[in-house]
Image: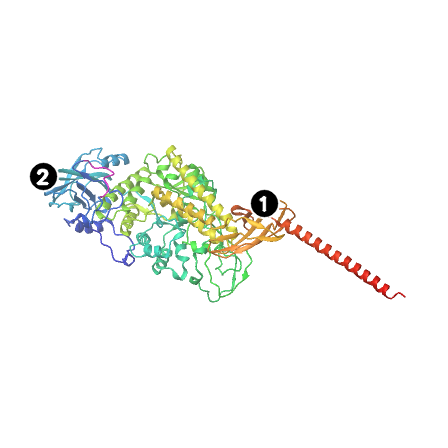
Amino acid sequence: MTQSPSDPRARSRRGTRARWSATVAAFATLLTLAGSPAGAAAAVPGSPPVVATQERPAAASPSPSPTPSDGVPALSGEVALLVAPIGGGVVTAGQALIASVTVDNGTELPTAGAEAVLSVGLESLADRRALDAWLAGSDGAAVQEAGRAPVEPVASGARQTVAVTVAADDPVLTGRAPGVYPITAQLAGADGELEARSVIVVPDPAATAAVAAMVPITAPALSAGLLTADELAALTAPGGDLDAQLTGVEGTAAILAIDPAIPASIRVLGDSAPEQAVEWLDRLLSLPNSRFATQFGDADVATQLRAGLTVPLQPTSLLSYMDAGDFPPQDGADGENSADDAGQPSGAPRTDASPTPGANTPGAGSATPSATPSAPVDPSAPVYPGLAELLSIGAAREAVYWPAGDAVAPDTVAGLAPLGTESSPALTLVPSDRTASGSDGAAVPARGDAAGAGVLVYDSRLSDALQTASLLDDAVLRGAELATASAELAFAKADAPGAALLVAFDRSSARSYVALDTAIAAALEAPGVTPLSLPGLVAVPPAPVEIAALTDDEGALEAERAAATSALIDDEARIGRFSSIMDDPQLLTGPERAELLQLLGVSWLATPAARTLALTEHRTETQETLSAVEMLPPSTTQLISADSALRPWVRNDLPWPVNLELRAAPDDVRLDVQEVTAFTVPAGSNARVEIPVQARLGNGEVRVDLQLRSPTLEPIGQTQSVEVVVSAEWESIGLIVLATLVGLFLLIGVIRTIRRLRRRSTADDASVAP
């Protein structure tokens, strides 16, 4: 059982870790506890270390943990035995050997009383292959009994742990030459005999090595651009994943690989950020550990290069994630702002002076001050932080790239090499099993040069063992894996004498701070080890190294990943063109880029099905965004006058107003249509657009093609066609006929009036004649 304080941050951390000798006493007390029920044991994520059962020998990959049903753990049907030397299996001169022997009863009947017998090999194991064979149970070794301890009967579903101690002056230990020795634990009793295997390490005082350990500070796989306030509150609370990661590295010399999306998620919330998240960020920035930034969202750079990019993608703007109410005006602000890297146009709410992203700023590119002239704004406007400030992780080494281990190939390293600077040459992290000299499991010097490209090679086997140990909450299970890690470290020092070594913990959001802390200590505080910082590691003279090519299967998998990445990049380009309808396109393009990078996160590769689903959902959402602004299908229009208008409806489902142009093109000269009509549709509304038209003489049907475009002439939505029935010529003919008839009637009336007047004048003349 491992006890931890209620608040990990409150625990006292010594200036140096307690040595393995101090751990012996603690484990001696722990291992005297017996009969603890299996249900009370800590959950064990991942695959447990080597165990042996009555039915089968010890194996490297035992059956998975039983699945609980109705709150009661299912029985495995086996009695399992585990041996774990304490102190990571390291036994220095003058130190006793204490090993925990655990019996886990997964059967329905209690076990009989028995005796645990601990034996130690007479000869050391030769190399890593011999270590594999021993732990897998495929190779034997001559052993000598070293100690015994009684084991009481174990109830069904329960576990019991006993300690077997071998005194420091016992002949089994005294006079042993340095090396890795096999050990066994046997349980002899009425139920038959069980055997479990592990190893101990007798360190060589003359064997020294400088070792660096890299630990990622990353969030779980995301499809959203940033963590929400609720997610941050949970992750940074005591016991949360981010809190555990940070607490686990405090007081160590681990090199931190920090996802800049995490501090950005906290900073964009301004005054509304959860208090524990703000405290977590303060703790991160105050740590003295050397560090570098991963890509935003820990996006895999190898896949991006294979998708055709020459420079990995960087975030462009996070303005859409910020609320004005969370960023009050600052006293003494100068009342000016500029178009900076936060994404604000001139005249928008102010941003603090910040640089423009380039290629090598941690997670965002190098900083180049913006020379854009500033424009006066309201001094009471909110002051948003710039992009570089949002992404800052503190003082960090630039141009360090950590691609997914199974994706590294010669083209990856060669593609990243030009991205560095003279002061910070590009460095790519490479697992040793991806190198020609380390493909068989041999250790490789940490600092390498691959055909002119700088690389940092981490030991695959040692890293895997420490990674597994860091994921185990059960102290006994973790102790067995740490013993394996100690053996891997001893062999690595022997394979590469005098060379600097590197271990890398893989991304994970499922480990306790105790497990992480212990695993780091196993690497950096082992006898003869000097911890290396990142600057110290970079300063080591590089050794030539050859990067191995991908196998056919690996190449096919990478091709699939690259195709999916290309599809995301193409969709983003469509969003970029579509966003030209907005006053500030970065409100749309910024989140799209952030989400794209999160979907390329290395953590997604551990769950291919979930990754595929997330990619599909994102592409669907992208299509919905592209369809958020469109012209509704118009109906047939009857035109009975010479001057009229077409009035189609335009829908805008975006939360921002959009600026559009409607372009009309008739297919017949009988209709004159205004070619371009500019208009604005308010956010979340429909608007009717009036297009003036004029009919010429003639009648019939005219088709008018209507196309929405942005002010930059990008097509928006599909072209719509409206049928216009032109009947305007009958109106003109009718007017002409009517005017002619009126003219004729007037003329006839005039003629009749003149003739009447003439007849009247003639009659008057006749009446006055003599």
Residue 190: which numbered mark, if any?
Answer: 2
> Residue under circle 1?
701
Category of crowding for the residue at label 2, using alpha-carbon neighbours closer than 10 angstroms: few (below 14), some (14–19), many (at least 20): few
Which is more toward the observer, 146 or 433? Answer: 433
Residue 375, image quadrant: bottom right
**Amino acid type, residue under disc 1 in the picture:** Glu
Q: Is residue 204 visible?
A: no
Q: Is residue 257 magenta?
A: no
Residue located farthest toward the front when viewing the structure as drawn: 770
| Residue 510 rendering spot, x and y as whole percentages | 30, 49
Contact (Cβ within 8 Å) of mark 2 with mark 1:
no
Query: Which region shows up in magenta?
Result: 56-65
Residue type at tag 2: Ala
Cα distance in 3D space between marks 2 and 1: 100 Å
> Looking at the image, how many numbered discs can be counted on the residues?
2
Image quarter (top left, top right, bottom left or bottom right) of the C terminus: bottom right
